[in-house]
Amino acid sequence: MFTAYYALSFNPFTNEIDTKYSFQSKDFIQASARLELLRQHKGIGLINGEPGCGKSFVLRCFVSSLSKSLYKTVYIPITTLTVREFYRALCDGLGVIPAYKKVDMFKQI
């Protein structure tokens, strides 16, 4: 296995890698700065990119830096949702019983 060949103590390419082992690349620093700006302005954001470029990892690092008592994070991994399904998933993640109508769900959120 490559871990033995390169004398690695762990596999750095798993999804469960600890955020303390993050490589501070230029792209990682840029994404982290944008997420921090988003946090300061209390907004909603979207991160997109090629598979394997580190989107999930930079988000995990960002979420781990947030205070659990001040922020509620909701992870919705499905990309093919309709607007109504997205609102429903967001309501569920926030612990809100979703209304029937899309407009009402939007107001609840």
Image (cartoon, rainbow, N blue to C red):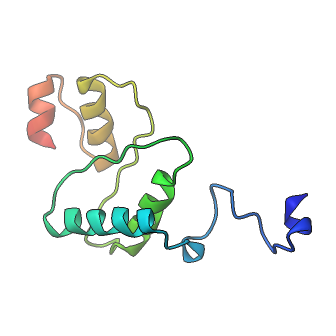
Whole-percent x, y for residue 25 in the image: 49, 69
Q: Position of residue 32 (x, y in %)?
A: 36, 67
In percent of width and height, residue 5 lies at 91, 66
Residue positioned 42% across, 62% down in the render: 27
Residue appearing at x 32%, y 40% in the figure:
92
Image quadrant where one finds the C terminus:
top left
Horizontal relation, residue 82 to residue 10: left or right = left
The residue lying toward the viewer, choosing from 38 and 98, is 38
Quarter of image, res 26? bottom left
Give left or right: position of 6 versus 31. right
Compared to residue 82, the image places residue 73 above or below, namely: below
**Quadrant assignment, res 101:** top left
Quarter of the N terminus within the rendering: bottom right
Q: Is residue 12 left or right of residue 85?
A: right
- Of all residues, the one furthest to the front in this rendering is 26
Of residues 49 and 109, the one nearer the viewer is: 49
64 relative to 106, above or below: below
Horizontally, residue 70 falls left or right of residue 32, namely: left
Taking 1 as reference, is 21 above or below it?
Answer: below
Question: Total label count?
Answer: 0
Give the residue displayed 10% in from the left and 30% down from the top: 104
Whole-percent x, y for residue 23 in the image: 55, 71
Residue 9 falls in which quadrant of the image?
bottom right
Q: Residue, x 12% and y 35% (percent of image)?
A: 106
